[in-house]
Amino acid sequence: MADCTVLCRGNSALAAEFATLHRFRGALGRFLAQSASAQSLAGHPCVFDPPCAFDVFHNAQGEMSPGRAMPKPFVIRADAVGDDLALTVRLFGHGVA
């Protein structure tokens, strides 16, 4: 497991807004897409070795049981730290490898 945290000064009020997590997740996906393989962007397995981060964190990685996709190897959180906003991506499983 590994945490990556960014501190946004003076934005603690955003921690209480659910939309903050959606915007952060979207920004992360757009950033990872910039270095993704064309196959991964099309929803197919990445041809890079190791696979690009977009493939690992965005595309389906198989099923746990029929119709139940494997969970993504990360969670995100937004916390107020005094007057600041802390945005954290917690990586686990093959997201850390």
Image (spheres, rainbow, N blue to C red):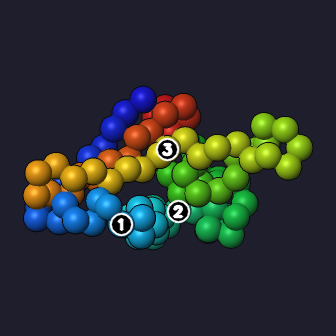
Considering the image in quadrants, where does the N terminus appear? top left
**What residue sits 59% from the left and 46% below the top?**
72
The mark closer to the camera, 1 or 2, is: 1
Q: Earlier in the sequence, mark 1 or mark 3?
A: 1
Q: CA distance from mark 1 to mark 2?
A: 30 Å
Res. 64 image quadrant: top right
Q: Mark 1 against mark 3, which lies toward the viewer?
A: 1
Inspect this view and state whether residue 59 appears. Answer: yes
Mark 3, secondary structure of its residue = strand
- Which of the labelled discs sits on residue 40, or is there none? none
Mark number, residue 17: 1
What's the residue type where badge 2 is placed? Ala
Q: Say whether marks 3 and 2 touch (CB < 8 Å).
A: no
Image label count = 3
Between 41 and 19, the one nearer to me in the picture: 19
Q: Which residue is mark 2?
A: 36
Q: Is 32 placed left or right of 15 in the picture?
A: right
Q: Which residue is mark 3?
A: 74
Crowd rating for badge 1 (residues with CA inside 10 Å; few <14, some 14–19, many 20+): few
Mark 3 vs 2, N-terminal side: 2
| Along the line of sight, the residue nearer the viewer: 51 or 31 | 31
Looking at the image, is mark 1 or mark 2 earlier in the sequence? 1
Please state which amino acid type lies under the numbered disc 1: Glu
Judged from the image, the secondary structure of the residue bearing numbered disc 1 is loop
Helix, strand, or loop for circle 2? loop
Give residue 46's position: percent from left, percent from top. 64, 54
Q: Position of residue 40 (x, y in %)?
A: 63, 61
Q: Is residue 78 left or right of residue 31?
A: left
